[in-house]
Amino acid sequence: MKVAYWPGCVSRGFTPELHGSMAKVAPMLGIELVQLDRASCCGAGVIAEHSQELADTLNARTFALAQAEMARGAELMMNICSTCQGAQSECQQRLDGNTDYREHVNRTLEPEGLRYERGIVNKHFLWLMVEEIGLDRIGSMVKRPLTDLRVGPFYGCYIVRPTDRLGISRETPRDTYLHQLIETLGGTVVDYAGQYKCCGFPIITMHRENSLKQAGRHLGDAIDAEADCLVTPCPLCHLNLDLQQPLAEKVIGRPLGMPVLHLPQLVGLALGVDPKELGLNKHVVKPTSVVDWSTSVVASVDGGGDGGRPGAVPASQRH
Amino acid sequence: MPEYTLRIRRYTPESGQAPHWQEFQVDLDGNRSVLDGILQAKDRQDGSIGIRCSCRAAICGSCGVRINGRPNLACHMHLERAEQTAVDGVITVEPMGNMPVLKDLIVDMDAVHWRKIQRVTPWLINKEPVPEREYIVPRESMVDVTQTMACIQCGACVSDCLSMEVDPLFIGPAALAKAYRFVGDPRDAQQFERLKDLAEDPHGIYDCTHCFNCIEACPKGVAPMNQIMRLRRIAGGDHEIEDRNNGYRHEHAFVKNIERNGLLHEADLLPDSYGGKFHPRAVPELGRSLPAILKALRRGKVTPQKALLHPHKAPKDVRRIYDVVEGREERLELNLYVVGEEDEEPPRQGAGTPTEPVATVTGRTPHSHAGGAQLPEERSPNR
């Protein structure tokens, strides 16, 4: 499927391994990425804090650019950043919820011939995998199931709250998709206290200690629950959980050393991509446990001799 | 009559015993509330269960608890619905978080919630001279504050505030929503002083991480976090309060960063949030971040070229949007709580006839149409 692809800023800035791993994984899943090169930052809630109209207009422009791609055959808009998903959904709710307001914003876009039409479908890669590709199909593509890898999901905030805006319901349980995906890839889900909590990143310049305390506490909780690694759909969470982890250790006074993976990296590992090609060497906390795991499993698969795919049976059905 | 199992967290601090769970079977219709269930257990099985309640109609705000791990009013959740969202079919009921437990499900609201409410001067400081009769205020400015007035002081947002979890001194969502009640009131004489106070406090408006937990928790649709963002917007936009917490500087650094680069250039954001690379304030802050920066460079996460050069420039139309929107005399703000959300697009009358936006003039007062507190839809059933 072809998608209008919005990679966001941080995936091309301080977490280049996210952008790179997405590019690796997409063709394997049959996703053609048409990158929205001219689109601008979603504002991450900060521009909206300054001026709602400015944030809404910038995102309406991004939506209009995506809709132009959709007119040329892209099925929907896809992003790879929870913060983009949350901030853009917030703007979309206002734009879709009031025709006069939308027309007002569209008038600002008019000189470049851009126009946002109500009701764009904008899905995070996580949602797209579950809802558009389907976990069964993803399961059938798994080459190296994450057997015995204990993965803690770290959802963060923007992709799970508020539930009504993000379309989370019993029919679309998007707040369980990371769980479902980890199981589909053959891994073991580790539930821990911080999985739906805030990484603290938004206040890193305003209240550094509180920010790092949050990151440190969730990482510590994951260690206590015996996770091998965390996986997050949000590059901003990744900054606080990985890049800042050595500083968080100091603030909470506890050694951590917990590897944190981006979502496409975890998928890529299960699809058999080399850890280095997924940029796992670019993390501040070396994901040694994960890489060791992946090499040892590769060895065992090769040794099996039958060449058959070990299969991806969800953990819930394995016993 | 269907049977439901309640697993209630019991705790009596004076006893010296640790908290423990206790299960009670209640038989009640599924559309009766969790509170009804607790009261039946208390009535028939154990009179010592501690629960605070009064109106049983989601008005008084007394019976805030956590049901299946999420804050709500016990009287505002049907047993049937609670059972559906329970992990193993057993409805767990425990006291709210972030506040000390006095007994079982009763928390000390005085020690935390009410003290924070007092912190924000929760009364009108009227403008002088006092008019002989009533103050005349525009209707829309009062509709604007109705959202915060819908608060019933139940403490559900305080219970799950993630900033307060690591910083008990954070003023918190309920009290800051209350602060907006008066900041947004045109009769109040001290808007600037109130905002200056809340912006300068290290545990004030800039200590909120926008995690949306309070929006999700509130049974009345107050959306405390949105009120905090409005406080920031007025503090920064109308009064240009440069606070000691870098809140104002961070916001402006971010907004300018996107205007220049189109995409966020992180390497500039950090120093600019402290006033610029060479500002005395920035030097120690950057020094503390140095180990992380060096490690990122070593791992090839960041390259010096990428950090120092600005490979991306904002497209021309992004700059134009900035000029247009930032050049407006008044900020526009649309509050869907106040104006309501359209379900479907109304038929377009004559495309091309521009209409004036219904949304809002602000500065201080988004204007509004249908008012009224809507109860938000049920919480996510999946966790």
Image (cartoon, rainbow, N blue to C red):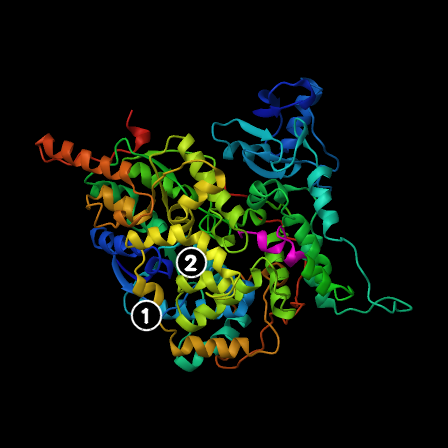
Residue B86 at what x, y percent from top left?
A: 51, 32
Up-down relation of residue B65 to residue A115 (above or below) = above
Visible residue check, residue A94: no
Residue B275 at what x, y percent from top left?
A: 52, 65
* Picture quadrant of residue A34: bottom left
Q: Nearer the viewer, residue A279 or A29?
A: A279
Visible residue check, residue B38: yes
> What residue is at 75 percent from the left and 70 percent from the top?
B138
Q: Nearer the viewer, residue A258 or B292?
A: B292
Q: Is residue B251 left or right of residue A178?
A: right
- In the rendered structure, which segment of residues is drawn in magenta? B198-210
Subunit that carries the residue with mark 2: A
* Picture quadrant of residue A68: bottom left
- The circle drawn on residue B311 is 1
Residue A109 at what x, y percent from top left?
A: 44, 77
Residues at circles 1 and 2 in contact by the CB criterion of under 8 Å: no
Subunit that carries the residue with mark 1: B
Residue marked by disc 2: A84
